[in-house]
Image (cartoon, rainbow, N blue to C red):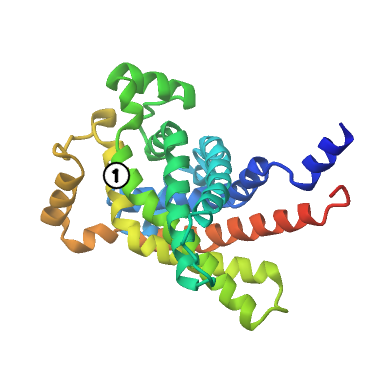
Amino acid sequence: MFHVVTQYMRHPPQPWTNALAGLSPMTTMTGVQGMHSDVAVLSRPSIFREALRIVNEEGFRAFWKGNLVTIAHRLPYSSVNFYAYEHYKKILKSIPGLYGNERHASADVLVHFVGGGLAGMTATCATYPLDLVRTRLAAQRSTIYYQGISHAISTICRDEGFFGLYKGLGATLLSVGPSIAISFSVYESLRSQWLAHRPDDPNLLISLTCGSLSGIASSTVTFPLDLVRRRMQLEGVAGRARVYHSGLFGAFRHIIRTEGFRGFYRGIMPEYYKVVPGVGIVFMTYEALKKFLSESPFA
């Protein structure tokens, strides 16, 4: 029995560690997330004008509207995401012939890219209804259609059916899969190169910087898909017009026709304001917690 407990402490389960890593930046970044939704999804003119509008019409506390549902979503999402990533990496690295006789950087990048993409899609499928509810609650302004998380879920099921909780899942998977794949692969590659050339630099600085850069890279590439999925999530809610009748590709055609190519990057700046500190803090916290557990006196 003592041997089992010792092994458990030496290799502790990581889901709660992963959850704390994902939760750490969420409370401070909720206000930016809300402004990002307004600029990108509701076509507000700019983040600064939107910030002034929120303060004037709803008060400063409105920046943290939907913080509870954000926490409720990010705890399980981050837990599943990091936990699945570590397991997918182990599975991919065990594939015969992947590395051959020598370890190649290209094989490492492939493992991190595929493992990250699979982990992101796994976490998304597991927590998607909460993501949908989070988006809709954050988009409410003068008209309050949903009273909270449970009311939103029951209302969506009543008005749109059970599968209404998964509206926009296809677009979300197409966005999240590549986004997390790019984020993990860029982070791991930058971190390994940094450690190879400057091994004495503080680990927290390395993780924070590499995480922030990986967030910029993934957001730049996948932002158009993220914008489309959020608009599809809000379609038909509280009297909003239904304009994306032909699915994902129809949504792309509609945006090109009505807003031009630049419409796909509406709201990209508040997205950067969110991901640069947010993703950096997530990776920094994750690495710090892993280091803390590995150096624990119980190990």
Amino acid type for the residue under numbered disc 1 = Ala
Question: Is the residue 141 above or below the residue 178 in the image?
Answer: above
For residue 32, side relative to residue 264 (left or right): right
Residue at the spot 27% in from the left edge and 48% down from the top edge = 228
Residue 260 picture quarter: bottom left
Look at the numbered disc 1 and give the secondary structure of its residue: helix
**Residue 13 in view, yes or no:** yes
User: Where is residue 257 shown, x and y percent of the image?
Assistant: 10, 54
Write down the residue under mark 1.
171
- Measured from the top left, where is residue 93 in percent x and y? 53, 57
Q: Is residue 52 visible to us here?
A: no
Residue drawn at the location 31% of the way across and 26% of the way down: 164
In this figure, what is the number of numbered marks?
A: 1
Q: Position of residue 187 (x, y in %)?
A: 52, 65
**Screen quadrant of the N terminus:** top right
Most extreme residue toward the left, as rendered?
Answer: 257
Tell me the crowding category of disc 1: few under 14, some 14 to 19, or many 20 or more residues within 10 angstroms, Cα based.
many
Identify the residue at horizontal 48%, vertical 47% (top origin): 119
